[in-house]
Amino acid sequence: MINFKKNSITDIARKFRNNSFINTIYENTPVFIQNLIYSSYGFFKYKEYKRLEMSLGEYDFEEKLSINDIKKGQVEKLKLLLSHASENSVYYNKLLKKSNLDINNIKSIDELKKIPILDKNIFKENYELIKVTNSDKYSPIAMSSGGTTGTSLNFLMDKKTYLHKE
């Protein structure tokens, strides 16, 4: 079973009030409106959490599958991912054609070895080509890496993945 980290109201408040403009408005708002803001925010976060929890129900199902069935499922999900990338990313469309990888005939995850590894420099140089053309459909959230290698990396993360990450 997947354990979800539940944020306390103070953690949510701290994130919400991190912005100085929002903090100024918040500090000058009557207490009952502050409570209403937090209650509303918590309600919407809870709804998103429940929606995500329901969509992750498939993981409970996968625990009961054989290793071969899990591998077949992984291959099918890989085909869906690569099809989406090929259809919606100029970079991956060219890369998949160049690697002679026939998405429909993938039999194993090992076939990913045919695709070159995407490093930070390639990502930065080709960001606009890598970004999928239908990214708005997935409610993207702008993110960045911590920059532990010297420079941070800006990227988009879909809302569902972001909520799962939290």
Image (cartoon, rainbow, N blue to C red):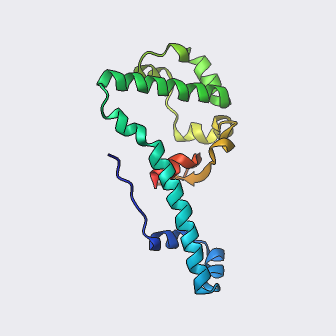
Q: Tell me: 129 left or right of 104.
A: right
- Asked if residue 147 shows in the view, the reply is no
In the image, residue 104 sits, relative to residue 112, either above or below, namely: above
Identify the residue at horizontal 43%, vertical 15% (top origin).
Answer: 107
Residue 98, given in percent of the width and then of the height, sits at 60, 18
On screen, residue 116 above or below 149 = above
- The foreground one among 85 and 125 is 85
Left or right of 41 on screen, residue 60: left
Q: Position of residue 161 (x, y in %)?
A: 51, 46
Quarter assignment of residue 36:
bottom right
The answer to which image quadrant residue 34 occupies is bottom right
Residue in view at x 32 percent, y 46 percent = 1
- Nearest the eye: 65 or 81: 65
At 35% from the left and 23% from the top, the residue drawn is 69
Number of marks in the rendered image: 0
Q: Is residue 11 visible?
A: yes
Whether 88 is drawn above or below 17: the answer is above
Residue at point 58% right, 36% down? Answer: 122
Percent coordinates x, y for residue 100 in the rendering? 56, 14
Q: Nearer the viewer, residue 109 or 127?
A: 109
Relative horizontal placement of residue 59, taking residue 105 as reference (left or right): left
Quarter assignment of residue 21:
bottom right
| 151 with respect to 61 (left or right) | right
Residue 67: image location, x then y, percent: 30, 25
